[in-house]
Image (cartoon, rainbow, N blue to C red):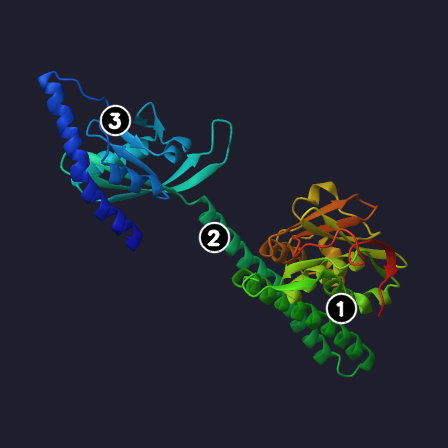
Amino acid sequence: MGLGWAIIVAFAAGIGVGVAAMAARQWRARATGTTSPAVPALPAAAAEVLAILRPSSIVLGADDVVLRASPAAHALGLVKHNRLGIDDLLRMARSVRRSRRVGQLELDLPRGPFSGSTLAVTARVAPLGDEGLVLVLVEDRSEARRVDAVRRDFVANVSHELKTPVGALALLAEAVHGASDDPAAVRRFAERMQHEASRLTHLVQEVIDLSRLQSDDPLEKAELLDIDEVIAEALDRCRLAADKKVISLVSGGERGLRVLGDEAQLATALRNLIDNAVNYSPEHTRVVVGVRRSGELVEISVTDQGIGIPKRDLERIFERFYRVDPARSRATGGTGLGLSIVKHITANHGGEVSVWSVEGSGSTFTVRLPLGSPVPANGSANHLSPAREATT
């Protein structure tokens, strides 16, 4: 039992006296034939504390009638017609009333009458006073369970992804040893080893980057950044790969827009988008990075003339290790983490990333970030310029 729950139990013992006194007065009123409210009121202090508790709260009378329930308890379907609507919870409450011991129960509650999904909740039940009253606290743990599942999947996926290049390196090393008398074969295997080693290095670095993003808040030490400089840095990082495929990197749009954030992280996000655009585009095409202001947002778009993304995959491409075409990703050295990193970085900066794509007609990824400072309505710092070739 955690410290927070211990405090709640101590509080419950304290308010139990007040609640029990109310219930006793109601019983005496019934016995003497005098009028009284149908449901006894909680002491004001007790009601205020219960109202601010994060878990859903229910006070159950000795006759299993609900004396008080928070709005969240009703929303979860825990209370129906002044009765507990969950049989397992009612049995727990009766057991706690008899044993005078705190109980805990894990439950899966339906999200609604038409939904097949459930909510994972933890219910804690404690006795209140000596009149048979019971306090029920129910906390929604669905998000925590989802995060745990994501973490387990992440570890499993990382293990799987690491096995592939490590296994390949082991086999290639064995092949090199066996082909020591054939210089041509040794060179061929050595090239493959270099490729797998590079892939392994890239994967490890992206896992480190993603882990760092989850623990660092870029807004704690944020700087006012010129988005043109961030884009220029990202383009420079991608120029070598683009030149190999004779792909032109083009940038254009409004100039002088600024955002608040971490320059290295934002450059990494844009580099990942540009890298993706280059990797999935045919030779002799263009990748265009555009910038514009939309209200109080800065929109940065990366558009390619590549193979596009099937509609069925659009909702999943920002998931960790998800690949539209695993075979092509292996050929290009993709890890399946690049877009997940982009999503984390934009979210940490208070923004979002979205995608538009038609299979066979290219894709456009758009990053939206809060505007860092007002830009003059008129002046050289805020104008729409024609697309320009990014300079080296």
Asked if 26 appears above or below 130 in the picture, the reply is above
- Dot 3: few (<14), some (14–19), or many (≥20) neighbours within 10 Å? some
Q: Is residue 356 visible?
A: yes
Q: Amino acid at mark 2?
A: Asp
Q: Which residue is mark 3?
A: 65
Seen from the viewer's position, the closer of residues 23 and 272 is 23
Towards the viewer: 30 or 81: 30
Give the quadrant of residue 76: top left
Q: What is the distance, in whole Å, between disc 1 and disc 3 at their CAs?
A: 67 Å
Under circle 1, the secondary element is helix
* Mark with earlier residue (2, 1): 2
Q: Is residue 35 left or right of residue 147?
A: left
Residue lying farthest to the left in this orientation: 32
Q: What residue is at 55 percent from the left and 57 percent from the top?
A: 154
As measured in the structure, the alpha-carbon distance from the residue carrying label 2 to the one carrying label 1 is 35 Å
The percent coordinates of residue 198 (x first, y second) are 70, 71
Q: Position of residue 61 (x, y in %)?
A: 22, 30
Residue 246 drawn at (x, y percent): 89, 63
Pick the front one: 38 or 59: 38
**SS state under label 3:** loop
Q: Please provide percent x and percent y for residue 248.
A: 87, 61
Q: Quadrant of residue 47?
A: top left
1 and 3 marks in contact (CB < 8 Å): no
Alpha carbon separation for disc pair 2 and 3: 36 Å
Residue bearing the label numbered 2 = 148
